[in-house]
Image (tube, rainbow, N blue to C red):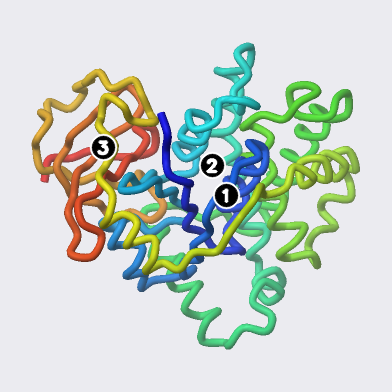
């Protein structure tokens, strides 16, 4: 199936955006780059997603894919080779990536944003922006327990030693070639190395990790062209969502775990971080993802896709 060139909505400092940028580079894909604000309000984002405002998300025509894990699945369908999910690692690579995107990520970011790291991350920015960023992320962490920097430091050091033991014998986490687990593990460490280099001495105790990071970074970001947010919205407005039986996610059989029929008005909300919901009509609920149909005055009719894991489906 021919698909339009993917459009990544992201911002430079976002670790999860770096994960997807590397996935695009690994796939050696051409893509359009739309830079989004790092904090609310995000009117151009909401026009496409209906409420979800985490970065990144991927747009293919009038189909919007939320969450970096789902985006990696979509890229795999767009360009199967080289694979992010080698057959012999299909299960373990996903499980490890989920650990890296959650447990490792939150330990690393609690370490990175201790006062000294926050000062470095926002160096050169107006004080009001730093204050607004902190307030924005605090609002997004409703019902989450944040690690104290001391506890995060201990955990982060432990995780780095475990990662080192995996890359001392071969080039990547699970062998000679990278997979999705490498990209998910890399991005919080990338933030330490490149966004708060004054705290990057924590990486020095595990030199094998630094060498592995160099190999991951060498993957690059593929072939990128800039696109304005307004133009991306126009792309969606001029397109039609892909037919569900011809969608990039495949596996379109209905799986009802909630007693919610297709065609029902629903909301889909992240379980924890950034719990703004997206409302729409449930048009697909497969074993791996949900799809909502919604209409926006600017973007027209779009399909917004979410993974099942990490998201909550409710009747509206």
Q: Which mark is residue 102?
A: 2
Find residue 164 and report its horizontal and vertical position in percent: 82, 34
Q: Is 1 drawn above or below residue 266 in the view shown?
A: above
SS assignment at label 3: strand
Q: Looking at the image, do the residues carrying marks 2 and 1 touch, with CB atoms under 8 Å apart?
A: yes
Spatial CA span between label 2 and label 3: 23 Å
265 with respect to 21 (left or right): left
Q: Quadrant of residue 63?
A: top left
Dot 1, crowdedness within 10 Å: few (<14), some or many (≥20)?
some
Residue 290 located left or right of residue 168:
left
Instruction: Name the secondary structure under disc 1.
Output: helix
At x 67% / y 84%, what residue is drawn? 124
Residue under label 1: 106
What residue would you read off at disc 3?
291
Q: Residue at x 72, y 38 (%)?
A: 159
Q: Is residue 300 above or below residue 44?
A: above
């Amino acid at each position: 199936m021919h698909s339009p060139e993917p459009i990544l909505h992201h911002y430079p400092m976002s670790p999860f955006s770096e994960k997807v940028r590397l996935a695009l580079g690994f796939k050696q894909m051409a893509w359009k780059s739309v830079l989004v604000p790092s904090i609310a309000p995000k009117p151009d984002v909401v026009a496409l997603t209906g409420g979800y405002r985490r970065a990144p998300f991927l747009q293919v025509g009038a189909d919007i894919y939320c969450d970096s894990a789902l985006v990696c699945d979509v890229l795999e369908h767009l360009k199967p080779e080289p694979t992010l999910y080698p057959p012999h690692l299909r299960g373990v690579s996903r499980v490890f990536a989920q650990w890296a995107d959650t447990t490792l990520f939150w330990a690393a970011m609690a370490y990175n944003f201790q006062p000294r790291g926050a000062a470095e991350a926002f160096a050169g920015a107006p004080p009001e922006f730093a204050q607004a960023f902190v307030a924005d992320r605090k609002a997004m962490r409703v019902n989450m327990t944040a690690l104290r920097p001391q506890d995060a430091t201990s955990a982060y050091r432990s995780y780095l030693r475990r990662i080192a033991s995996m890359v001392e014998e071969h080039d990547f986490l699970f062998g000679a070639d990278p997979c999705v687990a490498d990209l998910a593990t890399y991005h919080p460490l990338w933030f330490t190395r490149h966004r708060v280099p004054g705290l990057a001495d924590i990486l020095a105790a595990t030199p094998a990790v630094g060498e592995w990071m160099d190999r991951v970074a060498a993957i690059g970001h593929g072939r990128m062209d800039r696109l304005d947010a307004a133009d991306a919205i126009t792309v969606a407005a001029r397109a039609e969502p892909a037919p569900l039986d011809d969608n990039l996610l495949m596996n379109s059989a209905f799986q009802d775990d909630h007693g919610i029929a297709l065609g029902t008005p629903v909301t889909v909300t992240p379980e924890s971080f950034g719990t703004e919901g997206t409302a729409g009509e449930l048009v697909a609920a497969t074993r791996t993802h949900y799809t909502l149909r919604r209409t926006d005055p600017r973007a027209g009719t779009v399909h917004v896709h979410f993974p099942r894991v990490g998201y909550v489906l409710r009747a509206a």
